[in-house]
Image: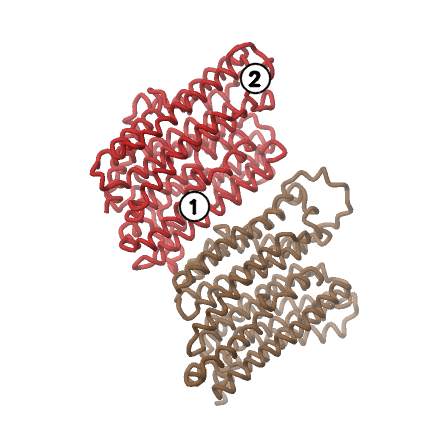
Amino acid sequence: MESDAGLDVLAMLPEIVLIAGALVVLLTGSYLPRSRQGVAYGIATATALLSATVVPVTFAAAPEAVFAGTFLVDTTTQVARIAVSGATALVLLAGRRSIAGSPRESETAALALLGAAGTLVIAGAGDLLVLAVGFLLASIPLYGLIGLAGTARAAEASLKTYLLGALFGILLLVGVTLLTGLSGTSVYGELPAALAESPAGAVTVGAAAVLSGLMFKAGAVPGHFWVPDSAQGANGLVATFLTTVPKLGAFLAAFRVVAALPDPAPAAAFVGVLALVTMTLGNLAAYTQDDPRRLLGWSTVGQAGFLLVPVAVAPTSALALPALLFYVLAYAVTNAAAFSVTLALPGFRSLADYRGLARRHPALAAALVVALLGLVGTPPTAIFVGKLTVAAAAWQGGAAWLAVAVMANSVVSLYYYLRWIIPLYRPADAVPAQPTAPLRVGAARTAMAGAVLSVLLGVAAGVVFSVL
Amino acid sequence: MLSAIVFLPLAAALLLTVPAVSDRVARWAWVAVAAADLGLVAVVWANFEEPPEGRLAFEERLEWIPGVGASYHIGVDGLSLPLVAMTTIVFLACAIYALRDEDRPRIQAALFLFLQSVSLGVFVAADLILFFVFFDLSIVGMYFVIAGWGHGATAGRSALKFFLYTFLGSLALLLGFIGLYVSADTPTFDMVELAEMLPLQGEPVAGGAVLAAILIGLAVKTPTVPFHTWLPPAHTDAPAIGSAVLAGVLLKMGTYGFVRIAMPMLPEAWRAWAWPIIIVGVISVLYGALVALAQQNLKRMVAYTSVNHMGYVVLAVGVAGLVNSGTEDARRLAIVGAETQMVSHGLITAALFLLVGVLRDRAGSYDLSGYGGLAAPAPRLTTLFAIGAFASLGLPAFSGFIAEFQIFAGAIGTAPVTAVALLGILLTAAMFLLALQRIFAGKTRGGSIGFRDLSAHELWSAGSLLALSLLIGVLPRVILDVIEPAAATLAELVGR
């Protein structure tokens, strides 16, 4: 028993690194003078990188399920760890300058690490109660993070997120209570057998409540309202983090929940409808946006719709899980790259500000084009492979209409991404001379690295798929 | 070998993105790389032998995404090799034509080399996903050509329309590909395997739906009526070399898709839908010719002749699906004609667009009424344009005649009612004669006054394209020997 527990702890090393790192950052930040807070931030960045690098350690050491089956250490969790820790590191690298010197530097970094840890708990949870804990661990840091910017907009976004989070948290708990009450267990692995005799209607309601709660984290309908406001109102670093990282866990958790039901068809259909509504709403709402971060905020809602498609065909398509895992990786890289461009140019709060960027910073403009066309799903970027496999999984799983919806929505989304790309290549001389803030080099480099990574991931998709 | 042909321009394009490269070096490097690529294609052409059915010549295959049955699989046969050759020729002509361009020549060269790579990629791809990757990237590349180098205040709008419209088409196409993939016994995106497996044989509804998705995707790109509305604005605002590539090369991706994907993989659905395809082809022929006749803008006029000429191809491939008519030879003839027409239209229309571009370069307008008597100051332009116009309307001794003669011989032999499309030739003839008369004949006036005739690089680029059209017209065996065996195979495949 003793040695088993030791193994179990080792299997959760990435999560432990994140939480321990967050505490160290918090303590270091408390004892360092304002001018030296960068040290704490550096520790946070190193922690995220370390968490991503220790993932391979757990490959061999870990059994598939640890702590009596309440936490799963399978391919899904490993992919979540790489995506979440890696994206957190990218975000922290890109956001360094947007937070440097602010009074809340180390707190922001610590909260981001805790949010990442919570996301990993959601992704790896093998038990409804652990899922609920993960939900809180991932949500509470967010409320603080959004509010830290201190502006009126941020306060509004923070309050909105908090109220929605509380509401959907309760919904999740209702669902957990219902399913646990019906089955007498909360472990996913035991649910199918334990729920087999339960009334189907009650199981469906419980599952729908759990899934709806997760939609808050996923930034999908019906829990999406906080995403655009927060993307626009929060500090740039925070906006990047909260549109990229927390939702990664939610899709994987939703996939596990749907797969753990004795009759997954009604829940899968429910998710299918949510996917359709989410992608359509997100893409249509992005149409008229002029603030690049708000536009990206709505775009992440649209992307959430695409990411829900494999969840909707989880029980019927063998391709669904690899497609979802690949899309999660692709999304994390591409979205972080696109947001990093807005971090590199913090003064640009309107699409028109980007006029002529291609002449002044050709490499950054190219990175933005790659990231945005990547979000559209242009080959050979990673999201293209993601969308392709997601659509193929939908068709294979008997939901050809979802495949059609994915394609139709991709066309719709192209329009607003192009609204951003077009000004890049317009001559800038028509724009009145404006005081532009200097380029933030760190964020620009991260954006370029992210763009290159998104193409490499697409070209090398075969290698990645072979391990999924 | 084929990989080298495809990726040589791309590698050069990447090198040209280095800012240290001077404009002069960039221009000549572009010409050199395009010429080297053409040389490689010539080697392939010299060593080409029609592969046995179910195989490709110069085949290369590497695993890419085995999880979803997509591989890096390329190769050529008699249907793709002529288009590969035509593509490298058109791009070389554009490189020569652009030797005097002043507007960001280094980036322009890089962009066109990129376009050359992806265009060649489309024609050699033997995997649906690989095909789609190149197909989609060609749209992205052309978008930047129109948006970045287009003239006129509406270039941005036209580029946007082009992108949205053709992207819609490409996603419909992808949907069809996924349909094929999902329906196959062992899911794969490999074209050769899919053509053997015939995934949707015996399922008329699903087969029809998948064919519909693929047809819409290809019809947007070709374009056929009613999906052609993106074409005139895109051409009007694109730079001359952009138009040449768009009409000469990119449109062929649509028609090539018919013969490479739709017909061999969905023969049953193709036969069932042959008549609607024929009707769309005939309408495109007549509508394209009529609208071209009404144009006041010479470039728009040439653009609409593309709708007309691509209509012949659609008509021909539709006729190839009329298996029950019992006219095996006529159907084969139609396919040979369609393939020849693709090459011929690529050469002639690219030349015409390059020549029309000279008008704007000198006098800033494409307006027919803005010129008159241009023959006096610009005899070389007049001669070449007249040759191009006659070649385009299908005068014997040019490639267009070989193509259209075979198309009509095949079509009328199979379905006599298609003779109505002959009217299209009459209309294009009238249109070109009117245009020639208004611009080149009469008293020198308007934009014609002080018009500088073709310079050497313009003469050589457009002139060699027309010379090749003449060569094919006089010695058609050069190209028919390559096309005919592949066309016979395809006619058989459609009959399955």
Quadrant of the drawing holding the N terminus of chain B:
top left
The residue at 44%/44% (across/down) is B135
Mark 1: few/some/many CA within 10 Å (<14, 14-19, 20+): many
Residue B1, relative to residue A390: is it above or below? above
Residue A418, relative to residue B232: is it above or below? below
Rendered hue of chain B is: red
Residue B460 position, x and y percent, is 46, 21
Residue B128 position, x and y percent, is 38, 49
Q: Is residue B14 visible?
A: no
Is mark 2 in CB contact (under 8 Å) with mark 1?
no
**Chain ID for label 1?**
B
Which mark, by number, is residue A241? none
Residue B376 position, x and y percent, is 53, 10
Give the residue pinned by disc 1: B217
Q: Secondary structure at mark 1?
A: helix
Give the residue pinned by disc 2: B371
Q: Secondary structure at mark 2?
A: loop
